[in-house]
Image (cartoon, helix red, strand yellow):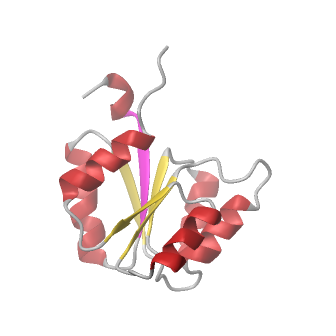
């Protein structure tokens, strides 16, 4: 684990508590600092107070769904500055492509293999050379 990785913060936004706990434990075991929440409104509030280096975002959320969260992040001055990976059971490709237009950097289907998701996360959290 690089020193930079230890300080990287990931926000997991999903209303499936068991999934967020499993993901959180796995990511923390790899040295990431993790916060979780179960709805879109809380996600925006958390990001406002505690900027993250990456967000894992479900689409089917209470209060504000993942699409609404992406659109609000994109509407901020300077656009969405945090990479967002959509994790969803939704297999409708057109809807997933919409998330990319809304500002997501990638998407990953559920159920997922942790190692593959971790590799995808690392792509977007690769420390820039000093």
Q: Nearer the viewer, residue 28 or 113?
A: 113
Residue at (59% x, 75% y) in the render? 67
Q: Is residue 73 left or right of residue 56?
A: right
Q: Is residue 10 magenta?
A: yes
Q: Is residue 52 magenta?
A: no
The furthest residue to the right = 77
Q: Nearer the viewer, residue 34 or 95?
A: 95
Residue at (64% x, 76% y) in the render? 68
Q: Which residues are magenta?
A: 7-13
Residue 58: image location, x then y, percent: 44, 73
Residue at (52% x, 54% y) in the render? 105
Figure check: 32 above or below 13: above
Q: Is residue 40 shown to the viewer in this render?
A: yes
Q: Is residue 39 shown to the viewer in this render?
A: no
Q: Is residue 113 left or right of residue 77?
A: left
Q: Quadrant of residue 113?
A: bottom left
The furthest residue to the bottom = 62
Figure check: 14 above or below 103: below
Q: Where does the N terminus fall, quadrant-wise?
A: top left
Q: Nearer the viewer, residue 59 or 49?
A: 59
Q: Is residue 114 left or right of residue 72?
A: left
The furthest residue to the front = 94
Q: Is residue 75 left or right of residue 8?
A: right
Residue at (26% x, 47% y) in the render? 28
Residue 114: image location, x then y, percent: 21, 57
Residue 123: image location, x then y, percent: 39, 41
Q: Quadrant of residue 127?
A: top left
Residue 3: image location, x then y, percent: 33, 23
Figure check: 130 above or below 71: above
Instruction: Considering the whole magenta stretch, tell me its main secondary structure.
Output: strand
Figure check: 35 above or below 69: above
């Amino acid at each position: 684990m690089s020193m930079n990785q230890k300080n990287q913060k990931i926000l997991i936004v999903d209303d499936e508590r068991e999934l967020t706990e499993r993901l959180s434990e796995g990511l923390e075991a790899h040295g990431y600092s993790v916060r979780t929440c179960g709805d879109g409104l809380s996600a925006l509030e958390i990001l406002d107070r505690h900027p993250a280096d990456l967000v894992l975002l479900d689409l089917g959320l209470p209060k504000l769904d993942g699409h609404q969260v992406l659109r609000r992040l994109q509407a901020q001055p300077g656009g969405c500055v945090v990479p967002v990976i959509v994790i969803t059971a939704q297999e409708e490709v057109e809807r997933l492509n919409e998330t990319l237009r809304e500002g997501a950097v990638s998407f990953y289907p559920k159920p997922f293999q942790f190692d593959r998701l971790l590799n995808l996360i690392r792509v977007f959290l690769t420390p820039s050379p000093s």
